[in-house]
Image (cartoon, rainbow, N blue to C red):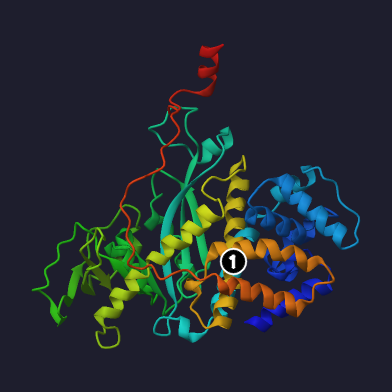
Amino acid sequence: MFQSFRSAVAKARQHDNLVFAGLLSAESIHYAFGDARRLWRGWVYTPAVTVWVFLSQCLSADHSCRDAVARLIAWRVAGGQKPCSADTGAYCTARADLPEEACQQLVRDTGSSLEREAPAAWLWHGRHVRVLDGSTITMPDTEANQAEYPQMKSQRPGCGFPIARILVVFSLSVGTVLEAAICKYEGKLTGENSMFRELHDMLEPGDVVLADRYFSGWFDIALLLSRGVDCVVRKHQLRATDFRTGRRLGKDDHLVVWSRPQRPSWMTREQYVTMPPQLVLREVRIRVTQKGFRTKSLVVVTTLLDAEKYPANEIALLYRQRWQAELCLRSIKSVLQMDHLRCKCPQRVRNELRMHLVGYNLIRRVMAVAAFESGRPPWEISFKGALQTINNLLPLLALRAAAIDAWCCTLIDAVATHVVGDRSDRYEPRVVKRRPKPYALMQRPRHEYKRNTA
């Protein structure tokens, strides 16, 4: 992994590419663009340069277009080239022309390529585990954004922000984003399980889906089984559990039969007929003994029926790793500041979301190399520490005085140093110490406040 990383950095230096080419090559960007690259216009802001500058904007603390263009000027001057204009108009125009499918393809490519290089020791029983989790993001209050991603109905017009629901599929082994979807916050077929059904094509036979009880519906499990995909999900609280019934496999571990319910409204009759009349599933009760944890007992449903190959305690440990999805989402939304996007039209909002995910995957690649070289699993490396190290060391790559081998070793060693402590059983009271600002919430449009104070 280190040699492939070093080769990519050396190739970027050899072709005088922008510093981000060491993490994402121009060839990868051109492949994602496909035929759209031939229609691209721009001397400075080529497809590769536009993506690289966009990534630098998403991974910086400032997040402004002016800061991103200034970083491009600094790179061109450091490489002996003529500086481009500091005006952000050309960059914003090029960024708006980025094809959505190309940006989505970059997310898939950067996430799956690292997972293919992962050592077998990072897999679970030699299988790839896909962890699901959903969240929400907000965006500027413009007419275009409100039309496609309306604000919550409980908020008065002019008092809220457009809000969208996102679903992200992570790789448990390396933590990268493999696929993502975005839709309205409310409305028909906007639930996380509905969004995941649209992403089923990214799954391969032998995969294992790890998710919470929102994805434990009968048809959700049956659709996965029809693709040869297993699942480990928490059982929904409305389903009764009786371990005195079924085929006993051990203490708090048995096989049960779930009969097919009536056809849901979102499923066609032709698809409903292909569903099996019954599902044989395995239920495992997990008892939580850690002090401070709210949940004391939960039931996990899985299609992994072999109790000898997949013991109950390993199923419990696997389900606990579902928390990694929460931590990954926190890294994306909090560390990368993606909780509130900045673009003012829906198409640009979606591409801004995707570029954040691409940037996140690139940071994860460096973390994986550092973890492999240090003999640690990748989830023990600090994401924020890796981001801070990369943001400070990456500009030095443009300087010819920096030797490639020394630069790569310094970067990997520094990232590997930032290890996250083992705090699996830590608990904190759900209270807030810092007082909020004593301002009232906006309950009327801004222009009404200005009119009343005039």
Q: Where residue 450 appears, x then y in whole percent?
A: 55, 17
Q: Is residue 107 left or right of residue 197?
A: right
Residue 143, quarter of the rendered image: top right
Q: Is residue 172 left or right of residue 242?
A: right
Quadrant position of the C terminus in the picture: top right
Residue under the point 63% across and 51% down: 61
Q: Nearer the viewer, residue 71 or 435?
A: 435
Q: Disc 1 designates what residue? A: 386
Q: Nearer the viewer, residue 107 or 313?
A: 313
Residue 144, quarter of the rendered image: top right
Q: Where residue 104 appears, x then y in whole percent?
A: 59, 60
Query: Looking at the image, which residue sits at the far front?
Result: 433
Helix, strand or loop for disc 1: helix
Residue under the point 63% across and 75% down: 412
* Res 303 seen here: no
* Res 289 seen here: yes
- Crowd around label 1: few <14 · some 14–19 · many ≥20 (10 Å): many
Residue under the point 33% across and 56% down: 428
Q: Where residue 235 appears, x then y in whole percent?
A: 24, 64
Residue 210, quarter of the rendered image: bottom left
Q: Nearer the viewer, residue 372 or 90?
A: 372
Quadrant position of the N terminus in the picture: bottom right
Give above or below for 119 relative to 76: below
Residue under the point 54% across and 81% down: 118
Q: Where residue 47 appears, x then y in whole percent?
A: 75, 59
Q: Is residue 448 left or right of residue 274?
A: right
Q: Nearer the viewer, residue 372 or 24?
A: 372
Task: Give the number of callouts.
Answer: 1
Give above or below for 395 relative to 370: above
Amino acid type for the residue under numbered disc 1: Ala
